[in-house]
Amino acid sequence: MMTKVHNNSQNTKYNYDDSCSPDLSLRNPLLSNQDRGVSSFFLDTLANDWNKGGKLSSSDTLVKLKARAKAKYLTNKYIYRLIDLHSPLEKQYWNTYFCNHVLVQEGKKIYGHYCSNRWCFECNRIRTAKLINGYKPAVESFKDPFYMVLTIKNVPCTVKDLQSKVKEMNKEFRKIIDLIRKRDGLYIEAIRTIEVTYNKRTNELHPHFNIVVNFNSVAEMIRDEWLKHFTKEQVDIKGQFIHKADKGTLKELFKYVCKIDDKTPAFALDIIYQAMRGIKLTAPNGVRKVSEEIEDLVCTEIKELDPAERTWWWNSEKRDWETKNCWPDLEGIRLCKLIEKLIKNKSP
Ligand SMILES: [Zn+2]
């Protein structure tokens, strides 16, 4: 069952109430005052990517729940580095901190809230899966798919430099596609994504396109025109790659806009995220577009759960969601542990 009432994470207020109020709507920090009383319809569910008709098998439930807990743990571990920069994206970084921070159980259904940000491991898992599944039929219909990488030389690590360069790359690519279509009469099908990496040694950024096209000849024409559309100071033939698409192509294509890892300094990540604001990460040509937005109001039932009204709070130490107890000495119930136990008890 899917009910969409409110889909604006930017407006969400986080009034963290740590008390033991029995009223779920009052305890839920994801609800603004205006939202209170409308209950969980303002929340999305724990299981956006679990949507197999709303129900999952026992093993699927546990695997997905544990994967989500891991993604939540990794996101919160690194997001402080971005929050501490106090950049124009600080509010959105805090939204990511609270991504699925609290889960609300109503009956057998569990609801959570997704931040939808590009730098969130939890949301990116869903986004990547959605894009791969969405574009897979198109790529499978390509007669002879080829994967290519188009690069330009590195740019200074500033928001302004990166933003203008990415805009220029998009503009030139569109011109090239139009030219080949008109001049050579070729039917081009392509899906391109933009990726930006940071070079620590030179303190520069490296924006590049990952593209899958319907024919090798098309890939070669695009590459040749790419080299003509920029000066020798801007592009180098050695930086361009073409090879036959394989099983890993779609995964490669929809990698994140930049690699989220400990090696990339927070300031560089922040510059990339600021520069890429409002710029689409994926762009199809001759292929039906798949939205990058992730669905944030999906209702999934966990059939193993005993029906109850509970709030589950993220506990980073235990890497699990936990019910809070009014008595500080008493431990709460842990969600992953509980599901594990319920599945075990049920199995013959
Ligand atoms: Zn998120």
Image (cartoon, grey):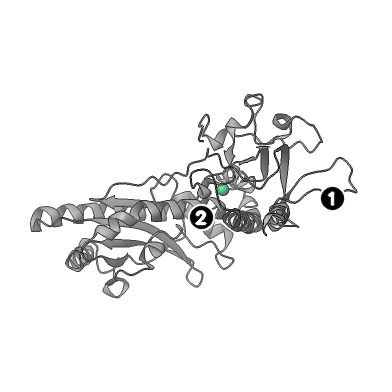
Q: Quadrant location of the C terminus?
A: bottom right
Q: Nearer the viewer, residue 6 or 304?
A: 304
Give the answer, above or below, for where 36 lies relative to 222. above
- Residue at 72 percent across and 44 percent down: it is 312
Mark 2 or 1: in front is: 1
In the depicted view, which residue is nearer to us: 119 or 323? Answer: 323
| Image position, residue 20 (x, y; %) | 82, 36
Residue 8 lies, in percent from the top left, at 52, 34
Spot occupied by residue 294 in the image (x, y as percentages of width and height): 47, 44
Q: Disc 2 versus disc 1: distance between alpha carbons?
A: 31 Å
The answer to whether 97 appears left or right of 126 in the picture is right
The residue that mark 1 highlights is: 331
* Residue under pointer 2: 125
- Name the residue type under label 1: Glu
Question: As displayed, is residue 346 above or below residue 108?
Answer: below
SS at badge 1:
loop
Up-down relation of residue 188 to residue 292 (above or below): below
Badge 1: residue crowd in 10 Å (few <14, some 14–19, many ≥20): few
* Left or right of residue 230: residue 34: right
Identity of the amino acid at label 2?
Arg
Q: Position of residue 54 (x, y in %)?
A: 52, 43
Q: Is residue 167 visible?
A: no
